[in-house]
């Protein structure tokens, strides 16, 4: 973990358990422009929303331990995770990778193209969902990839070991 504290750290706006996807969803605060028109999390554009991520680790660990058999996925979304300090995001993802069950998959959601996702994050994530939300390309046919409904047809999910290797 990093030695910085408080307001210098990446913020988590909130986190919860999603019963539909059997996942712990972690919402990172902060997203740089340009923002996706019609963004469903515009309240998370502000980097000051929420609290430093290190303050959530104990609660997240308790939930992982308590619901170990029920958690299939841990999703990191935002805001925009890749707009954060890379060392903070790496620390969070690495920590999650060490405390999760071996069967639990880590998902990284980003608006950036896959080629712009740093390899260090690709190496930890089991799945990377890429592409800006585009309200002019809504997924009206309920297209799914790896079990997840894509919000707009320009988005794509990459699975480590199938769609990419690091």
Image (spheres, rainbow, N blue to C red):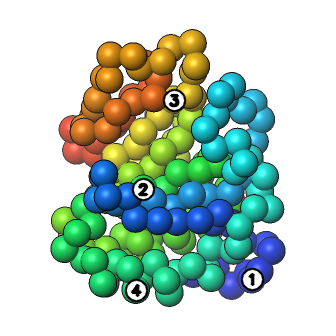
Q: Which residue is mark 4?
A: 62
Q: Which of pointers 4 and 3 indicates the residue nearer the eye?
A: 4
Mark pair 1, 2: CA separation:
24 Å
- Give the image location of residue 109, x and y in percent: 48, 45
Mark 3 Cα-neighbour bin, 10 Å: few <14, some 14–19, many ≥20: many
Quadrant showing the N terminus: bottom right
Q: Earlier in the sequence, mark 4 or mark 3?
A: 4
Q: Which badge, 2 or 3, comes first in the chain's sequence?
A: 2
Q: Nearer the viewer, mark 1 or mark 2?
A: 2
In terms of depth relative to the viewer, which is nearer, 57 or 2? 57
Q: Is residue 15 left or right of residue 55?
A: left
Whether residue 69 is situated above or below residue 90 in the rendered picture: below
Query: Is there any visible trace of residue 41 in the rendered image?
Result: yes
Mark 1 vs mark 2: which is more N-terminal? 1
The part of the image, by quadrant, that contains residue 88 is: bottom right
Q: Residue at x 48, y 18 (%)?
A: 138
Element type at mark 3: loop
Q: Disc 3 designates what residue?
A: 131
Residue shown at 54% from the left, 71% from the top: 91
Q: Secondary structure at mark 2?
A: strand
**Which residue is farthest front?**
19
User: On the image, numbered disc 1 is attached to which residue?
Assistant: 5
- Whether residue 37 sits left or right of residue 158 in the image: it is right
Disc on the earlier residue, 1 or 3: 1
Gap between marks 4 and 3 measured at Cα: 32 Å
């Amino acid at each position: 973990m990093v030695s910085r504290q408080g307001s210098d750290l990446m913020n988590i706006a909130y986190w919860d358990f999603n019963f539909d996807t059997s996942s712990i969803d972690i919402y990172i605060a902060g997203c740089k422009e340009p923002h996706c028109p019609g963004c469903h999390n515009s309240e998370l554009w502000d980097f000051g929303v929420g609290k430093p991520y290190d303050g959530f680790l104990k609660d997240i660990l308790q939930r992982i331990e308590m619901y170990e058999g029920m958690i299939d996925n841990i999703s990191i979304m935002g805001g925009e995770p890749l707009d954060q300090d890379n060392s903070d995001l790496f620390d969070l993802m690495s920590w999650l990778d060490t405390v999760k069950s071996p069967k639990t998959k880590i998902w990284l959601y980003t608006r950036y193209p896959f080629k712009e996702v740093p390899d260090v994050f690709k190496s930890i994530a089991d799945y990377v969902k890429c592409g800006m939300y585009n309200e002019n390309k809504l997924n009206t046919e309920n297209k799914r990839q790896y079990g997840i409904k894509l919000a707009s047809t320009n988005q794509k999910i990459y699975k480590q070991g199938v769609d990419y290797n690091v």
